[in-house]
Image (cartoon, rainbow, N blue to C red):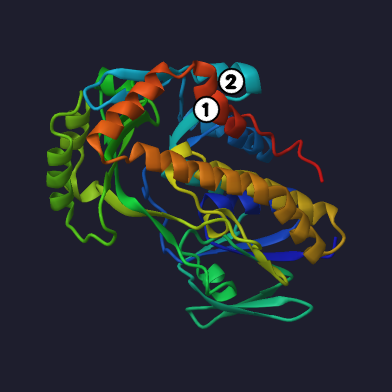
């Protein structure tokens, strides 16, 4: 094992999981994150059985399950509340040995940070550029400092600055729809008891319980990218878009403080050939960003973190390890990206007649066919994959 010191750019889920996995394998790791303070950022996310398996290997699965909420049922509904499909997610725990868990992103961050060695995470330090030779790689930061390591991992998200330096020709692909997100603390039993995604005409609304008292919601709508709006404008728009939808959608929107409603245009990148250049590689959304339609974006980062760490531990040199890492991750992450893109296109259909046909097909399709892709995603075991 020739790689001794590793720098990770990005203190998100992928970067933190990679750091934990690498430290468990004896590497010297430093994580640099540009934000000065990690707080109640983001909203909710779903960790399927495939991710929980890896988190158990990293030693944090029980804490994640305790801090989040098990998803036992997940429904697809029409905008009026009519049931189109009901997936019994509890079956996955019986089949794959781990549950499906929804959790607030900030709660997950806290658990992962607490699992790191002291002083691993450096906040308020932004990446500027890297330079490398045959021996090592030097990273330059916005505070004028630099650091040198045997390997640099860019885990800095869909807008990755590391990727931009490595592959300036790669551009994001806009999905055609934007997403709003929020979290509501509530005692509303209808909201707390419902995990669902409801489909309209070019619009969708999702509801997921993330802990004992909080519900994460998301909404999507077809529109041009780049909309600028205040929180109050977002709330007014959402209340208009979803005014006639089933309960408890209006309640959740009304209960969310306007300044806490997030909005992000949804992008991905079509799968590309290589994530590595010399002693620099990419991970998570920097390498294989996906639209959120399968709930597997964070899961892919968790899987990749484990596989990269294992490859670095078992291979004799860094570049061979990176080739092995990519060979084990490319096909799976490409499938997730492409399938999620396709599902999103179906969910965002804007022709009313096609929407009615879509809803009818979902309602009459056999359960086994509907679950095929879910089980292909959630039944995967990154720990057992070998070259």
**Residue at the outermost right position:** 316
Image marks 2 and 1: residues in contact by CB distance under 8 Å? yes
Name the element at disc 1: loop
Q: Quadrant of residue 288?
A: bottom right
Closer to the chain start, of discs 2 and 1, is: 2
Task: Name above or below for residue 81 compared with residue 233.
Answer: above
Q: Secondary structure at mark 2?
A: helix
Dot label at residue 100: 1
Looking at the image, residue 69 sits to the left or right of residue 271; the answer is: left
Q: Residues within 10 Å of mark 2 (few under 14, many from 20)?
A: some
Mark 2 to mark 1: distance in Å? Answer: 7 Å
Relative to 215, 34 lies left or right:
right
Front-most of 239 and 119? Answer: 239
At 44% from the left edge and 35% from the top edge, which residue is drawn? 103
Q: Circle 2 is placed at which residue position?
A: 93
The structure residue drawn at horizontal position 71% and vertical position 53%, both measured from the top left corner, is: 308
Q: Residue at x 28, y 50 (%)?
A: 262
User: Does residue 61 show up?
Assistant: no
| Residue 102 drawn at (x, y percent) | 45, 32
């Amino acid at each position: 094992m020739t790689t001794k010191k590793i720098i990770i750019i990005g203190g998100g889920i992928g970067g933190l999981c990679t750091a934990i996995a690498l430290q468990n394998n004896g590497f010297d790791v430093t994580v640099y994150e540009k934000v000065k303070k990690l707080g109640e950022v983001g909203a909710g996310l779903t960790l399927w059985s495939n991710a929980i398996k890896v988190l158990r290997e990293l030693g944090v699965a029980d804490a994640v399950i305790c801090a989040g909420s098990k998803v036992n049922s997940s429904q697809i509904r029409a905008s009026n509340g009519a049931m189109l499909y009901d997936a019994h997610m509890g079956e996955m725990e019986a089949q794959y040995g781990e549950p499906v868990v929804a959790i607030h992103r900030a709660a997950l961050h806290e658990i992962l940070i607490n699992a790191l060695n002291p002083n691993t995470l450096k906040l308020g330090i932004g990446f500027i550029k890297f330079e490398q030779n045959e021996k090592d790689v030097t990273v330059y930061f916005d505070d004028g400092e630099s650091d040198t390591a045997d390997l640099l991992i860019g885990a800095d998200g869909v807008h990755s600055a590391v990727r931009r330096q490595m592959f300036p020709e790669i551009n994001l692909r806009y999905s055609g729809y934007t997403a709003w997100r929020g979290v509501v603390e509530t005692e509303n039993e209808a909201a707390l008891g419902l995990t669902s995604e409801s489909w309209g005409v070019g619009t969708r609304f999702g509801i997921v319980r993330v802990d004992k008292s909080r519900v994460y919601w998301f909404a999507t709508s077809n529109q041009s990218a780049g909309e600028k709006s205040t929180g109050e404008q977002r709330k007014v728009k959402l209340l208009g878009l979803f005014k006639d939808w089933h309960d408890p959608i209006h309640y959740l929107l009304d209960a969310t403080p306007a300044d806490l409603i997030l909005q992000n245009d949804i992008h991905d990148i079509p799968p590309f050939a290589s994530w590595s250049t010399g002693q620099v590689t990419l991970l998570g959304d920097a390498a294989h960003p996906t639209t959120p339609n399968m709930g597997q974006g964070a899961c892919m980062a968790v899987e990749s973190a484990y596989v990269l760490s294992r490859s670095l531990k078992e291979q004799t040199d860094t570049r061979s390890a990176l080739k092995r890492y990519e060979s084990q991750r490319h096909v799976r992450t490409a499938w997730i990206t492409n399938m999620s893109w396709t599902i999103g296109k179906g969910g965002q259909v804007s022709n009313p007649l096609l929407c009615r046909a879509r809803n009818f097909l979902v309602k009459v399709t056999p359960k086994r066919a509907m679950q095929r892709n879910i089980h292909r995603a959630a039944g995967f075991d990154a720990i057992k994959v070998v070259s």
